[in-house]
Amino acid sequence: MARIGVFVCHCGENISATVECDKVAQAAAGFPGVVHSIDYKYMCSDPGQNMIREAIREKNLTGVVVASCSPRMHEPTFRQACSEAGLNPFLCEMANLREHCSWVHEKGEATTKKAIDLVRMMVEKVKRNQPLYPIRVPVTKTALVVGGGIAGIQAALDIANGGNKVIMVEREPSIGGHMSQLSETFPTLDCSQCILTPRMVEVAQHPNITLYTYAELIGLDGFIGNFKAKIRKKAKSVDEKICTGCALCTTKCPQKKIPSEFNEGLGKRTAIYVPFPQAVPNKPVIDKDHCTYYKTGKCKICEKVCPAQAIRFDQPDEIVEVAVGAVVIATGFTIHQTGFFPEYGYGRYPDVLTGLQFERLASASGPTLGEIRRPSDGKIPETIVFISCAGSRDPAKGIEYCSKICCMYIAKHAMLYQHKVHHGKSYVFYMDIRAGGKMYEEFVRRAITEDQVNYVRGRVSKIYERDGKLIVKGVDTLMGAEAVEIEADMVVLATAGIANPGAEELAQTLHVSYDGHHFFSEAHPKLRPVETNTAGIFLAGACQALKDIPESVAQASGAAGKVNILFSKSELTREPLIAVVNRSAPPEYSTCVGCFLCQPACPYQAIEKEEIKDRSGKVIKTVARVNPGLCQGCGTCVAFCRSKSIDIQGYTHEQVLAEVMAVLEND
Amino acid sequence: MENKIFEPKIVAFVCNWCTYAGADLTGTSRIKYAPNVKIVRFPCTGRIDFMLLLKAFGEGADGIIVSGCHPNDCHYTSGNFHARRRWISFRSLLDFLGIDTGRITFSWVSAAEGAKWAALVNDTVSRIKELGPYTDYEKVARYYEEEVNHE
Amino acid sequence: MNEYQTIAAGLLSSGTAAMVIGYSEGSAKRVRPVFFTRPEEASTLVFDSRCVQNIAVYLTKKEIRTEGKIAIIASLPVMRSIIQLASEHQLSEEKIIVIGITPSGEVKQFNGFDALDAYVSSTTIEIEARYREKIEQVEKMTLTERWNFWKNELSACFKCYACRAACPMCYCTRCTVEMNQPQWIPVPSHTLGNFEWHIMRAMHLAGRCVDCNACAEACPLGIPFNLLTKQMILQFKKDFGGYNPSLKGLNILSSYLPDDKENFIQ
Amino acid sequence: MNIGFYPGCSMQGSSPEYNESVQAICSALGISLIEVSDWNCCGATAAHNLNRELSLALPARILAHAAADGLEEVLVPCAACYNRLKMVQHEIGADRKLQDSISEILDEPYQGNARILSILDFLERDVEPLLAEKIMKPLKQKIACYYGCLLVRPQNILDAKRHEDPQSMDHIMQLLGAEAIDWAFKTECCGAGLSVSKTGVVAELSGRILDDAAHRGAKAIIVACPMCHSNLDMRRKAIEQHRNKDFDLPVMYITQAIGLALGIDPVKLGLKRHFVPVNLEL
Amino acid sequence: MIESYLLQSSSLTKLFNKLIETRHIYAPVKKGMVTSFNRVESLEEVAKDYIQTTISAKSILFLRNEILFHYKQENGDVKIMEPDLQRIPELVIWGCRPCDAKSFKSLHSVFNWDYKDIIYSSREARSAIISFSCNQADEYCFCTSAGSGPGHTEGSDILLTKLKSGDYLAEILTEKGQLIRDMIPAIFETPSSESKEDNLARIPIVFDTAGLKQKLEQAWNSELWITQSMRCLGCGACAFVCPSCSCFDIQDEKHGKEGVRSRCWDSCGFSLFTRHTSGHNPRETQAERWRQRIMHKFSYLPDQQGFTGCTGCGRCSRACPADMNIREHLAALINDSTSPENRVA
């Protein structure tokens, strides 16, 4: 027989102001199976918890219902309290009288009645609860960091410095990411390369870090503490161990006109190339798509000139499998190219640039060695227009969000332009200036007041080319909504930052959720910003949402901290709220008939086949089994199972149906 | 009894991560709504068995709310997509059977949409009030009352 | 002997098959399923428009056990059932020989499921016009009329479960109606229980029903509950592009598309 | 497949030359069009400002007649009619309730699934492939293709390709041997909405279009909309006065240009009906 | 105590109209392919041309779902409300066949065997059975082999046999029958000389019931149980249409604080019928269930009650989706030559 205790909390006056808590406790005392029912001012306080502990001991309770706040708030608290009194923590349930009742309804009979219904519901549920025990799993103390931009670099270094192993996977031939492309950084205008390069080198040299560049993560199986990652190392066609990095090959390669990715297409590179001088590793790779030898079967000049004989045309792609305990995703972002904007010419005008292209123009290591020159004719632009929110905050373009970094880098661009072209005129079209950050607003002010950048509050409707000039048609909303037309020599679009192409695919490979824009979703927008909903997988940097360097670094360190916490124990425990396929005595063994229609429904590939054998080893029946390590407890399989052979602990058929029955019970 | 204002009984089947949390936010934001709706918590909309909806009507529910995470926002990646497909088929089947699907509100309410939850509840309550008690179904469910009195 | 009789006799006499499941003349001008093990019995096999019982149902019954292979005289719906059952891991290819008879009367022997799958995939499930009309007629009713129509029809059901027994897809060893902890479906055959039973049955057949009509043929009371599964087939065509039993495809209800369309989720 | 044809009022009233040229090239290329039976006004001008139900019911009736005629596609050359029909199809198609109430007004079930073809859809798909062999007189001039707004906006409903810089007319003109210039005013407003009430605005807006085309060396403007045509052609005097500048820039329908290249008699193409004379040497 | 009268064809309506003044009448009503006993208000509603109803008349006295009691939890106590049996109306079962009428005898004895079932008995006491002899039969009928016949009188209160003239021979068989006669004595006229037998369907005897029982006692291990039941689908159609099958299940249904306990039909053909909670099933296969069905009707019941649980109505054969024909199978069992040593697998 059930012996249930009900504990109704006033939450100060938060609940008791609209719910008559004493009446609730009284009503609950009359429910079948309830042997103890009280109300108290603060159940979560020490004396409150003591009341629960004492009642469990004295009345030998088999279940506890705490009628107070949301279980999302205090469920761990009360379960802990029960546990301390010797009651299995999963025999404690909470009725949400605060968030779902007292705070949302006026004082009155109906509100108290609802509170009673909610308590009855949880009493009926808890009667059907089973004691559950945490699941223990071992931990592999190696982290996989996907992406070698500043976020990935920071995360890898922090984890490695914490004494744990790291495997870093970077898609490009070099780590460094977007930060390596930047000229100066706001708000200090210090050189991006200068602060980044030492970190890159540290990664390469760290004894705890294994670096795979020119490599991609192609599969991830397993679960927290026990992932198996599959990495494809694309053939570099160069034996890294032998190559000295002299780069002679890159000077002799006949393919010299390939648009350089690093320079955002504004410069050229060869087919065997090092993306940029400070690359880590600083060894060339052959881009097979552009290499003459791979295309025609002839050439091999690089092979001839290589003093170390390091060229390997027959090198295959290599698949490596590694065991890791945690994953940090730091795959970063990309931006819309100018071709995305019909109104700005579909990318037809060479002097309409993206912000990243401007970074390369302004960078001393860029194609113009830091001089601002027009890609079309090499002239120095006399008039330059910067357009913020190009695509961002524009539902018509499918991007409702703010790209967050543009306001700051536009101010920086305009400043850099004014510093380099003293007589030039610069305009910034903006919607609002979002400069929330340490020294950020001051930085923008400096651009306006000291560097004479013309900020025009309004949007640009169209850009077209006429007689060698770019006609920028816009409106100045602060000057009586006057239409403005600027004849510019160069236009820089602060195009929207977007998720990397392939982010969706990666999310599916990793089984993490992502938002409508394919940015990876954090587990909680406020309180769990670096975790994903998949245990053991963490987020760092702009792959989660656009952010600037300091924020990326902070999040990366946060993710690294989480990984190090996870790795601080050799075993971890998980909540047992997972699905289970029933088992019974022979001749049935299980009511599961092994149709496996649940298999495609499981987002975690947690459903396995289990063969039930007789004593002689003959297979009698093949039934489903849920891998407790993989199952996250969504219960989708449960609703699919026709014979109702799968159930989910904590939300069993009996429990939820009892809840429905109880909540609809007539008085 | 007849003079009493009809207060519909509505059960809400919601997922833990979005709508339950959204309803928590409604509370935290102190937005008021009608007390007719009582929430049953599930880990995910993917867990919500269609039979539960039938059982709720059978137990005298006048209306039902089913709500979970917006598409692409599922805590478990795809439970809501599975649920959506299930509801599309189930709903059309119910409609074909003459069961009033107008009494079932399907919705996506995220953890951030506390106001939406309140509005959804209020809308549903007022719609069900207009429709009146679900006597057609209740008569069938409470068949024995008639029979027992009859004999 | 005609073609399928000859094939059946050959399979039995060569020992390739240990049993042939087919139809033979029964009582009162009916046909009945038969389970032949001797080649000389094959000459009494019949196949014609009366063969509406879906004999694929026997392939999953524990009572039908042989050491060797089972050959089955299969109409198109039976072939579909076999593929659907195979896709649900209920049949093993090594145990079954299909003597298929196509709607045009062609006899095709399938020794492996791949060939059968290819044949089945080349056909589509089409709801017969008379049922489509009936469904449209019901759909045109008002909500109350529909409710009364079904209340009237379903209240007659006495839950003999002939529909379930006749359906090859109802092979669960414990049907949900037999579950009593919790008791999902009331055991008595009152109207509510009947509604719940037939709704659950239709939902459990969603995306799996091969539209063989064996359930309705089996119903001693002539209740038109087959309209439910048929309506769902039509609806699936509209909503998800339809389905066909297949070894490769995913079940329509245990899969999804991120852009599935609906117009009712607020 | 039978291609339905909805002429609408402008093809019979203000812009007969458009109709004439459509018919002329179709008969020259052996394409037959079937006129929608008992058609009515699409309501483009005023209905949607005055009465929402009427503005939906008028095009719905046209579509219903097309369906009753068994037409799966309807060519709607007038850009305004095309725009209106597409909008209504979109609006009603997405709303079951609206379908019911429209059915009630029409007194028959709403059937609006016919594919609505703009002149550009039609030319691109059905005419372009036939052209290469049939061109007799290539047009060797610089021309400016002017698309206006009704054929491209709202882009998400009309599903116009490259809506800010459409290309379909440019392609056809290149096929005909002309050089289609790259210019900035392809889809700028000609002021048609204020064509009657505020002619000054029209003169300014249409003037800019002419100005840019002329500046870039175009010898003619090619249009596909009766509204654009009348503003650029009929209102030419007013424009020239407003800008204090003369333009030697005839305005032709694309169908007329095709007709010319096919060697059809200019009179049959209605080219004599224009206010700005069309240089036949084109 | 048989009293015979002539009932003119026009008097049938008079009889019906007289009865309906005071009683509920249940009679065969045809809907589509299905004929079943429904409550009727006029003779026009009654099916004219039927050999046998799809569902037997047992459903009128032995309800598909019978509420045994209704309970409510109140103030920590449970209040039980039993059905008010006094309110069961007087009823007439009109138009059942002699085989159905005979089967009420079997139901009566089951419900009055070791325990008198008051609900069944109250219904029985308040009902009168007016049967119609069979002047046609189909190939499923085998009443003459099952101790009944087309003009069998057992179980009926009045048996009407339609004569060639269109008039009816009315046999008043019981006191209840006499009471009905006395309600409207004028229509009961002196019978003509026409023989009842000449107006009955001819149904050949295919086996001898007594011989069957004897045979079954040795047939426990017969192969036939397996071969006959191979095509059995395991549904309950046969039992549910059967006029004699009386197995039932007791079920509780709870709705909040109240609920009902009811009795509903069950069938020994269901695998669930004997399955234990442990999963063990003493009748594991359909063959064992089929054997149970036949043994119960033709061996155990005769031992316990002195008569068979089958009146040869043939409904189970008609209803069987897999064409299991009981007449054919019983005949085969009688002629069974498989050795008793053969064991059921």
Image (cartoon, helix red, strand yellow):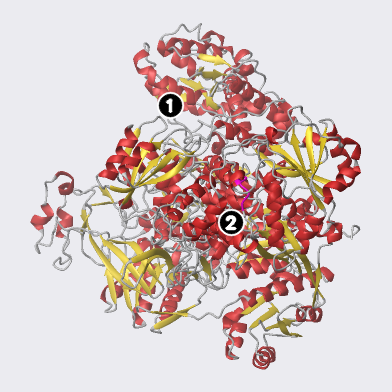
Q: Which mark is residue E297?
A: 2
Figure quadrant of residue E222: bottom left
* Residue carrying label 1: D170
Query: Which chain does the residue under circle 2 lie in?
Result: E
In the depicted structure, whether residue C107 falls above or below residue A658: above
Residue at 36% in and 55% down: A361
Q: Are marks 1 and 2 on the same chain?
A: no
- In the image, the segment drawn in magenta is E310-315
Q: Is the residue under label 2 in contact with that under label 1 (CB below 8 Å)?
A: no
Q: Residues within 10 Å of mark 1 (few under 14, many from 20)?
A: many
In the image, is A426 to the left or to the right of C181?
A: left
Q: Amino acid at mark 2?
A: Lys
Q: Residue furthest front?
A: E193
**Residue A251 at x, y = what percent?**
17, 55
Query: Which chain does the residue under circle 1 lie in?
Result: D
Give the CA separation, mark 1 to mark 2: 91 Å
